[in-house]
Image (cartoon, grey):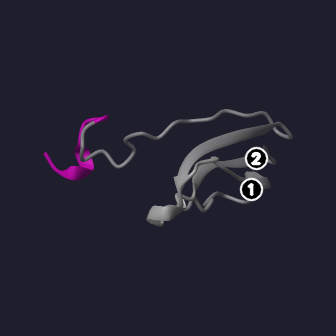
Amino acid sequence: MTALSAPEGSAADPDQGVKSITASVDAGFHVHLWEDRTRGEQWVPSYDARALALMEDDFLRTASGNAVDSGRRTFEFRAVA
C-alpha cells in the first residue's frame, strides 16, 4: 500500500479533517477557524474564484490579559457557479 492509496481517515490520507460544504448559487456561507497569530498561525483563503466569491474576511480577537494574539477568523463566501 502506498500513501496514494491510503485508507480514508488514516494518517497518510491528505484529505483527513476536510469537510464538504454544499451551497446553492448566490447563497452565502461562513467558515469559522481558530487562529493564534502569536505562534505565526494565520488563515489565508485559497479557493476557486470561478465557483466562489469571498465576501468578507474578519478576525475577532479574543480578549485576554496577556500578550497572546489569538481569536476567530471568519470567511464569508458566496457560491457563484
Give, as a single range, the part of the protein colored magenta: 1-9
Residue 66 in magenta stretch:
no
Q: Tell me if residue 53 comes above or below residue 17 in the rendering.
A: below
Query: For the residue carrying disc 2, how many other residues have a C-alpha within 10 Å: few (<14), some (14-19), or many (20+)?
Result: some
Residue 2 in magenta stretch:
yes
Name the residue rendered at 83%, 36% in the picture. 27
Majority secondary structure in the magenta region: loop
Q: Tell me if residue 49 comes above or below residue 14 in the rendering.
A: below
**Residue 79 rendering spot, x and y as whole percentages:** 78, 44
Name the residue rendered at 13%, 45% in the picture. 1
Residue 43 is labelled as none
Q: In which quarter of the image is residue 13?
A: top left
**What is the C-alpha distance between the residues marked 2 and 1?**
7 Å
Name the residue rendered at 63%, 42% in the picture. 32
- Disc 2 secondary structure class: strand
**Residue 40 rendering spot, x and y as whole percentages:** 47, 66
Sequence order check, earlier mark of 2 and 1: 1
Looking at the image, which residue sits at the far bottom?
40
52 vs 19, left or right, is right
Instruction: Find disc 1 in the rendering and name its residue.
Output: 57
Would you say the residues marked 2 and 1 are in contact, meaning their CB atoms lie under 8 Å apart? yes
- Disc 1 secondary structure class: strand
Q: What residue type is labelled 1?
A: Asp
Q: Which amino acid does label 2 sit on?
A: Glu
Q: Tell me if residue 28 comes above or below residue 37 in the rendering.
A: above
Q: In which quarter of the image is residue 11?
A: top left
Instruction: Find disc 2 in the rendering and name its residue.
Output: 76
29 vs 16, left or right, is right
Looking at the image, which residue sits at the far front?
65
